[in-house]
Image (cartoon, rainbow, N blue to C red):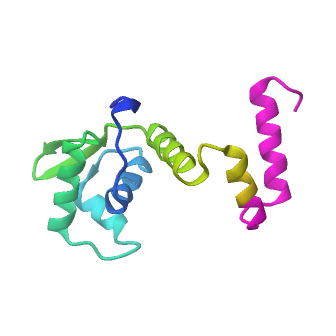
């Protein structure tokens, strides 16, 4: 697996592909990836192959050939990538302030009182407070 420090942010189309790979326990062929992506919109097979090759070059995927099919395996764990995206977002939009982020989400009604209660319970649990 690729180290967290070496990760770079993915363009949206490449992230869509990675989500399909991450959401499946089995290694997927090009046609299986295309089939799952096409639930949302049509995909051109040559464009998909180009993006899959780019993900291999960037170290996010590995592939192997079995018969006529090429199969893909994630080289980066989803949790590692999400941690990178969350850090970048927090820094870019909220100046590294989790309080500003939560306040903004609450003030815009994107999260509820219940969500805040769950967050408080999570923080208490992780910091050794009573939960």
* Dominant secondary-structure state across the stretch colored magenta: helix
In terms of image quadrants, where is residue 4?
Answer: top left
Residue 40 image position (x, y, % from top left): 41, 73
Q: Residue 103's spot in the image, x, y percent?
A: 75, 55
Residue farthest along the left direction in this orientation: 68
Determine whether, in the image, residue 69 is placed left or right of residue 108. Answer: left
Please say whether residue 117 is one of the residues in the magenta stretch.
Answer: yes
Q: Is residue 62 left or right of residue 112?
A: left
Query: What residue sits 61% from the left and 51% below the top?
Result: 94
Quarter of the rendering occupied by the C terminus: top right
Would residue 114 appear left or right of 28 to someone viewing this image?
A: right
Identify the residue at horizontal 37%, vertical 55% (top origin). 15
Instruction: Using the rendered view, name the quadrant where residue 112 is placed.
Output: bottom right
**Residue 68 % position (x, y):** 10, 53
Q: Position of residue 126 (x, y in %)?
A: 74, 28
Compared with residue 33, is residue 75 higher up or lower down, i.e. above or below?
above
Q: Which residues are magenta?
A: 105-131
Residue farthest to the front, as pictured: 95
As rendered, which of 6 and 78 lies closer to the eye?
A: 6
């Amino acid at each position: 697996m690729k180290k967290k420090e070496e990760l770079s942010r993915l363009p949206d189309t490449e992230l869509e592909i990675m989500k399909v790979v991450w959401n499946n326990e089995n290694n997927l062929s090009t046609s299986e990836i295309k089939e799952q992506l096409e639930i949302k919109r049509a995909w051109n097979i040559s464009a998909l192959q180009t993006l899959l090759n780019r993900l291999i070059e960037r170290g996010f995927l590995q592939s192997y050939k079995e018969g006529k099919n090429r199969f893909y395996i994630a080289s980066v764990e989803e949790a590692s990538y999400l941690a990178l995206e969350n850090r970048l977002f927090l820094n870019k939009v909220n100046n590294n302030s989790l309080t500003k982020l939560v306040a903004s989400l609450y003030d815009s009604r994107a999260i509820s009182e219940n969500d805040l209660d769950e967050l408080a319970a999570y923080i208490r649990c992780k910091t050794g407070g009573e939960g």
